[in-house]
Amino acid sequence: MGTHEITIGPTRITLVQGDITTQTVDAIVNAANSALRGGGGVDGAIHRAGGPAIMAECRMIGGCPTGQAVRTTAGNLPAKHVIHAVGPIWQGGQRGEPALLASAYRSSLAVATAHWAKTVAFPSISAGAYGYPIDQAAEIAIQTVLAEAPGLGLAEARFVLFSAADLQTYAASLERVRGRPRGDAAGPAKTPG
Ligand code: AR6
């Protein structure tokens, strides 16, 4: 398991492998659907771990368009807020998916900082049930958050990747941004064996 990070202005951008529901940050981002009805993946895990208060608020809110985000309490989770972001369903890439995915990250950051969140954890939105290719999803996630988070004064934007393979994909995107590939302790960890 590796930890990878870059600091830009006031913001540390970090990559970790893990479960987003256990993150001790001000806000965690959910990969939601536009009906805010819950489901599998990150969404299922957040509602299971957070308890029914989150769904009760989702029902009051009613829904959220693709590319946008809304805020609820985090119930029993260690975070203070859940930001429900709706990423696009992958349809081949010619249906506005990149712009909608970038918008989901931008909206999440705007909603989080409007609630004074200084530390925000993201899953790889759209890269599971919604079928977005992980390498392209990683590139958009990293570039969008790097472009937006420092100007918002965020202290930490943390990407929480479920699998070692996804972590490596995000690490490769971060290295491209950093512009100086390296193989030391701060770089991508080699899988043992
Ligand atoms: N922590 C961090 N990452 C996770 C976790 C977790 N606990 N569980 C899964 N992932 P997905 P989407 C990764 O399907 O593609 C739901 O049914 C997963 O490996 O959660 O945006 C919603 O209700 C993948 O890389 O979200 C929607 O209907 C990434 O999180 C729909 O799926 C996103 O996978 C949204 O699909």
Image (cartoon, grey):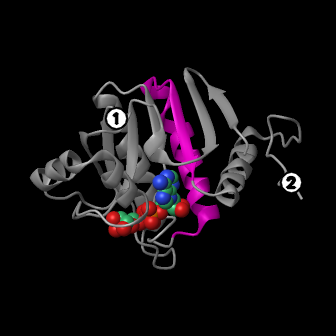
Labels 1 and 2 touching (C-beta < 8 A): no
The x and y percentages for residue 111 are: 30, 38
Q: Secondary structure at mark 1?
A: helix
| Category of crowding for the residue at label 2, using alpha-carbon neighbours closer than 10 angstroms: few (below 14), some (14–19), many (at least 20) | few
Report the span colored magenta: 132-161
- Residue 165 visible within the image: yes
The tally of labels here is 2
The residue lying toward the viewer, choosing from 105 and 36, is 36
Image position of 112 with respect to 17: above or below: above
| Category of crowding for the residue at label 1, using alpha-carbon neighbours closer than 10 angstroms: few (below 14), some (14–19), many (at least 20) | many
Type of secondary structure dominating the magenta stretch: helix
- Where ligand 1 lies, by image quadrant? bottom left
Q: Residue 140 falls in which quadrant of the image?
A: bottom right
The residue lying toward the viewer, choosing from 170 and 28, is 28
Which residue in the protein does label 1 denote?
112
Residue at far top of view = 10
Specify the amino acid type for callout 2. Pro
Verify whether residue 32 appears in magenta: no
Verify whether residue 152 appears in magenta: yes
Q: Secondary structure at mark 2?
A: loop
Which residue in the protein does label 2 denote?
192
Distance, label 1 to label 2, CA atoms, is: 37 Å
Question: Is 105 left or right of 85, judged from the image as shown?
Answer: right
Specify the amino acid type for callout 1. Ala
The residue lying toward the viewer, choosing from 156 and 20, is 20
